[in-house]
Structure formats: structure tokens, C-alpha cells
Amino acid sequence: MPNPKHKHSKSRSAKRRTHYKATAPTVAICSTTGEAHLYHRAYWHDGKMYYKGKVVMEQPAA
């Protein structure tokens, strides 16, 4: 297998990695509750779990 003959400097490696960026997640606003949440994810609001604007589950009473 081919191997590098000389060491790559830190700046050279950093130049190559400049395009690896973390992107901010896309956030949706629920039309029912007005809560911000991630797309395609259920979320809790006031003791109830919502998905696609509908109550899917309620938090059990303790």
C-alpha cells in the first residue's frame, strides 16, 4: 500500500478539513402548540407527547 514519504503539517491537514462543518438542525414550529421541535420527532409539551400536531402519549401521574 502506498504511504506518504513526508509528514503532513498541521496547517495542511487543517486546510483539508475546513469544509467539514456542523450544520444547524432544521427546526419546525408546531401549529397546535407553537413549540419549536426537530422535524420527524415527537416532543413533550405540558406533560403530553405530540407528533404531527396530535397527542400521542400522556405522561403518567406520579
Image (tube, rainbow, N blue to C red):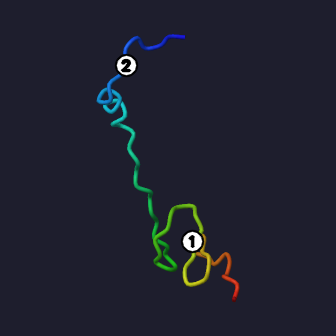
Badge 2: residue crowd in 10 Å (few <14, some 14–19, many ≥20): few
Q: Nearer the viewer, residue 45 or 10?
A: 10
Q: Image quadrant of residue 45?
A: bottom right
Q: Is residue 59 left or right of residue 23?
A: right
In the displayed structure, 18 sits above or below 62; it is: above
Say which amino acid is labelled 2: Lys
* 14 on left or right of 3: left
Residue depth check, mark 2 versus mark 1: number of the one nearer the observer: 2
From what the image shows, is residue 31 above or below residue 39? below
Which comes before the other along the chain, label 2 or label 1?
A: 2
What residue would you read off at disc 2? Answer: 7
Which percent across, then down, holds residue 41?
A: 58, 64
What residue sits 57% from the left and 71% below the top? Answer: 43
Q: CA distance from mark 2 to mark 1?
A: 49 Å
Q: Position of residue 58 (x, y in %)?
A: 67, 82
Residue visible at 40% across and 55% down in the picture: 24
List the residue tagged with mark 1: 43
Quadrant, the N terminus:
top right
Q: Which element is circle 1 on?
A: strand
| Amino acid found under the numbered disc labelled 1 | Tyr
Residue 46 occupies which quadrant of the picture?
bottom right
Above or below residue 4? Residue 43 is below
